[in-house]
Amino acid sequence: MATHPWIYGFFSYALLQCLFVPALAFSTSNVHIVYMGARQHGGPELVSELHHDILSDVLGSKQAAKESILYSYKHGFSGFAAVLTQSQAKLIADFPGVVNVVPNIIFSLHTTRSWDFLQVNPFVRDGIFTKSRSGSGTIIGVMDTGIWPESKSFIDDFMEKPPSHWRGICQEGQKFNLSHCNRKIIGARWYLKGYEAEFGKLNASDGVEFLSPRDASGHGTHTSSTAAGFPVENASFMGLARGFARGGAPSAWLAIYKVCWATGDCSSADLLAAFDDAIFDGVNVLSASLGSPPPLASYVDDILAIGSFHAMDKGISVVFSAGNSGPYPQTVTNTAPWILTVAASTVDRSFPTIITLGNNQTLAGQALFTRMDLNKFYPLVYGEDIASIGADETSAGSCDSGTLNGTLARGKVVLCFQSRSQRSDFVAARTVLSVKGVGAIFAQSPNKDVSSSWNLPYVRVDFTTGTTILTYTETTRNPVVKVSPTKTTLGQEISPEVAFFSSRGPSSISPSVLKPDITAPGVNILASWSPAASPVRLDTTGRKLPLQFKIESGTSMSCPHVTAVVALLKSIYPNWSPAAIKSALITTASLEDQYSQSMVAEGAPYKLADPFDYGGGHVNPNKAIYPGLIFDLRTSDYAHFLCSMGYNNTAISLVVGSSNKCSTKSTQFLKNLNLPSIAIPDLKQSLTVTRTVTNVGPMNSTYKARVQTPFGVSVRVKPPVLVFNSTVKKHKFKISFCTLIRTHGRYSFGNLFWEDGSHVVRIPLVVQTVISDNFSET
Ligand SMILES: *[C@@H]1O[C@H](CO)[C@@H](O)[C@H](O)[C@H]1NC(C)=O
Ligand SMILES: *[C@@H]1O[C@H](CO)[C@@H](O)[C@H](O)[C@H]1NC(C)=O
Ligand SMILES: *[C@@H]1O[C@H](CO)[C@@H](O)[C@H](O)[C@H]1NC(C)=O
Ligand SMILES: *[C@@H]1O[C@H](CO)[C@@H](O)[C@H](O)[C@H]1NC(C)=O
Ligand SMILES: *[C@@H]1O[C@H](CO)[C@@H](O)[C@H](O)[C@H]1NC(C)=O
Ligand SMILES: *[C@@H]1O[C@H](CO)[C@@H](O)[C@H](O)[C@H]1NC(C)=O
Ligand SMILES: *[C@@H]1O[C@H](CO)[C@@H](O)[C@H](O)[C@H]1NC(C)=O
Ligand SMILES: *[C@@H]1O[C@H](CO)[C@@H](O)[C@H](O)[C@H]1NC(C)=O
């Protein structure tokens, strides 16, 4: 059963334009994933045999089983994907050793400047970049649309040979052979069976897709080069944002798992196969910029949660994007507690574009505007004033498709206002071009993402500027306008701010696990691109030029930033658990912009950002190497957590691969899961939560607690002082919350700090008070 493909984002992100092929029909194939938990039955061959036996039993013959099976998952965990009818799936679900059977679903894909902005560079003394030797020794696995291996970002100068424990392969295919892997791209695999079972055979004869690890869409090349790209001098997007383009961990190795195709769709059966292989191959970090919208599947039905659970169990950190469905609450996805979930924020670079009106008034907009020449005065009209006969005026005001009169628009710049029904600047620009207008000015709620504006002549302004232009248009006999070429500025924007589109917490499936975890740059990010996905750029003589680099926005772009920082930390502390690394990132994250003012969140209206926007805050790589204390977690802790979420004992035992008993006290584990955050969605009167910290700083340390109390509650920490020495490395502490108000509250936010004079270990507190379970009269 295929769910509708979900393209992250409310507006027309570049992703949507590049990857969404609406002509795709949805087949009603019956791919199911039979998940059997941790591997328990000997070697991979035996496990695979078992899968075939189960399937033969149900389908009646070995031959039928062979035809039906797509994947046997046998390295990181046990299970298989096969074509099954509903009733066959039901039968298999009752087999001993089967945790559950879930239908295949389809997931969608969700700089030069950003790394200097994060101070990840060789110029910071004893910084993370230097200490980690820029990530050497660490292998980053990227699950995405593949890679363009010829990009300069992936040359392997100065790279070391892959480590001896590496078991990955370079899987050949269309326009991809062994020579395309090197000391940078040390592995490349591709997964198509689940996708084809849903959508039918992929036709790759037209050059729009490659049946190989080669990237036809650009997305995977962008994320891979952001994480681990080799520095490329003089990179730019048509001359904008010119500078060094590089990854955050340029000495880390890359292992490519192509699970998404140029349509932007990725099948869960394929993804699980990639997890299985990545665990076998021996990656250290896994990065995936994709997801599926609410309703969120339970953690034992969610393939991404299952795959990442087994990766985490093997010590692999898994980093996922939070989604692009902001600024609305409860839109965050990929919310399992063992995943690092990444929100997106802005950097201090902008692309101002000056608009001059006929009365010599100048106004500022934003665009990525280099090719079209609007740098002289053109007649200016408002869309509403040139509606074609029969078109709705409001739709014409927002330049919706087919609403403008070609006779009246020809040769003019058209002013459009975002409306409830037409929110996309991209649609407006296309409408204007289709009626031979020369360009569009699109007024909308302010936000800084201009990545979708490339290659079309339009400028984005906020409603205030748009209104000024409208007033001028309506009060002048022959209004005219001129648009100057876009410039690149650095340091002139207050930043970071949480991006408008970034998905927000709380998690709709487990609100007591704070999500997202952290934010990182994800707006207007320059990185490598696939020339195969850039047929539209022309030079001055009309020659097609392949695009080597491209500016993109999304949590897809912020995710590999955190992936790179995780890789740098792994290089410094190879033995730290995924939970320890995550803790170090969250407790050291920053809450401020460059002027030490509280970070704000883009949205309507602007507001101070809170943990539902950014989790622990904005990633602060150079601080993360000295966290002082960490909140660590083991696989068994997560098993208790699953108990407390109401999962069946038998199922959990299979998942974790050892017998598990959910104790009667298991509801305790939900609040006491040792996360570097405390979220209480339903505080009735009082509640006490425990956490354990491990000292990873100086051996003799004394930490004192300090609390910024959320509104409506009192908070007590016991003990208020923690003393560590050569024998005492860990301390448990209790933190008690008491309601002070007798009303249904709303979420309020605070912080708990442990401070020893040099380290500040901060975790966010998120509390909502409720009177009782329901609004009963008292
Ligand atoms: C791999 O492909 C390249 C072209 O992309 C070709 O030049 C080279 O000979 C091929 N190598 C092998 C081993 O097939
Ligand atoms: C694949 O696409 C090409 C070019 O678009 C077309 O000529 C060919 O018939 C297609 N093949 C199949 C099997 O659909
Ligand atoms: C950078 O590239 C541009 C063309 O894209 C070229 O004109 C310029 O000279 C280059 N600058 C350097 C320093 O290489
Ligand atoms: C705008 O400025 C130009 C040059 O500075 C001048 O020639 C023109 O008269 C001005 N127009 C108006 C309407 O002020
Ligand atoms: C477009 O405008 C012209 C001039 O006002 C008018 O003659 C024509 O009927 C209009 N066409 C449509 C489709 O609205
Ligand atoms: C747990 O689930 C399995 C099937 O998944 C079922 O057979 C078993 O009865 C369940 N156990 C409990 C205690 O609910
Ligand atoms: C820690 O404290 C103990 C006892 O006070 C002392 O002997 C030891 O030298 C200290 N160690 C360090 C590394 O400061
Ligand atoms: C460490 O602290 C504990 C508890 O305060 C104390 O009992 C122990 O003697 C200390 N160890 C050293 C080596 O100072």
Image (cartoon, grey):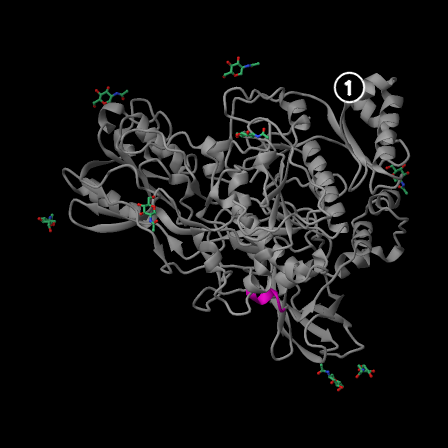
What is the x, y in percent for residue 488?
34, 52
On the image, numbered disc 1 is attached to which residue? 67
**Camera-side residue of 380 and 594:** 594
Q: Position of residue 158 (x, y in %)?
A: 55, 52
Is 358 situated left or right of 489 in this image?
A: left
Residue at 29%, 46% (x, y): give it.
467
Magenta stretch bounds: 622-626
Rendered position, 216 above or below 39: above
Residue 275 visible to an observer of this rendering? yes
Q: Secondary structure at mark 1?
A: helix
Asked whether 743 falls inside the magenta stretch, the response is: no
What amino acid is found at the position of numbered circle 1 in the picture?
A: Glu
Residue 771 location, x and y as percent?
Answer: 70, 59
In this view of the protein, which residue sits in the foreground, 58 or 571? Answer: 571
On screen, residue 699 above or below 346: below
Left or right side of 202 for 426: left
